[in-house]
Image (spheres, rainbow, N blue to C red):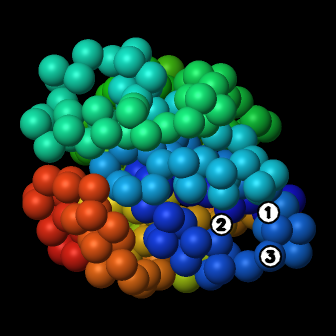
Amino acid sequence: MRYLVISDIHANLTAFETVLQDAGTPGEDYDFVWCLGDVVGYGPDPNECIALLRTLPHLCLAGNHDWAALGRLDVRTFNADARKAVTWTRETLTDANLAFLEALPTTFVLGEFTLAHGSPREPVWEYILDPLIAALNFTFFQTPFCLVGHTHTPVIFEKVGESESEPHTPQYNTRIQLNGTRRIINPGSVGQPRDSDPRAAYAILDVSSMTWEHRRIPYDVNAVQERMRRIDMPDRLITRLEHGW
């Protein structure tokens, strides 16, 4: 069984379509999609991204921007640019797509994998940005592996000893073996990377061979930026796409 693992699409249809084209054909190159949340937010295509995801065999979790679009989070905790994007998204989503977001779970356990958007400790909101936070989270899931998104940065945190973790930078297009140690793994962001690399990020998980492969693919950033300008998104949100921050 092969899974296409994606996260943080953030209403960027061009990046999402490019990832799907690169990943191959459902049923042939992968069997199922695991989406780790934040389908919407920031980008210009919230309805289109949900519609495309729903055409695929998938499991999707709720992210903080998905919840914000539903009014489940206090948008005053967001910066001014993010608040404007949340408001526009909320007003733009169809009733059917709001209902889709309403039904999303916050965590899921499948075999040897725990899935969460932010962290197993705080699934919707906590950022696992460094080895200390990663180490603290290992006690909050029981499976060997946990897949998370939210930070928009691809990384693998490997448990070392009883109370430490070690970060590993991805080697793209290289399969690594998942065995021996517990790990928290982030595939990176499809629609808004923040590791100074503007290419869309995703991963392929093969549970038959227990291998994980981080991937990156360039997409037409200018086309997305043009759509964002048409709906008057903040300049900072538009500019950051081309720089990956």
What amino acid type should be assigned to the residue bearing mark 3?
Answer: Thr
Would you call the spot at circle 3 few (<14 residues within 10 Å), some (14-19), or many (20 or more)?
few
Instruction: Tell me the element at label 1.
Output: strand
- For disc 1, the marked residue is 2
Percent coordinates x, y for residue 25 in the rendering: 80, 76
**Residue 203 seen in render:** yes
For residue 96, above or below residue 34: above
Task: Judge depth for marks 3 and 1 and give the one in front.
Answer: 3
Q: Nearer the viewer, residue 107 or 15?
A: 15
Percent coordinates x, y for residue 43 in the rendering: 35, 55
> Residue at coordinates 55% horizontally, 77% vertically from top-left?
18
Label 3, label 1: how far apart the Cα atoms are: 12 Å
The answer to which of marks 2 and 3 sits earlier in the sequence is 3
- For disc 3, the marked residue is 25
| Quarter residue 163 falls in | top left
Q: Nearer the viewer, residue 56 or 206?
A: 56
Relative to residue 77, is residue 189 drawn left or right? right
Label 2, label 3: how far apart the Cα atoms are: 13 Å
For residue 168, above or below residue 99: below
Relative to residue 146, is residue 46 drawn left or right? left
> Residue at coordinates 15% horizontally, 68% vertically from top-left?
239
Would you call the spot at circle 1 few (<14 residues within 10 Å), some (14-19), or many (20 or more)?
many
What amino acid type should be assigned to the residue bearing mark 1?
Answer: Arg
Would you call the spot at circle 2 few (<14 residues within 10 Å), some (14-19), or many (20 or more)?
many
> Residue at coordinates 66% horizontally, 57% vertically from top-left?
52
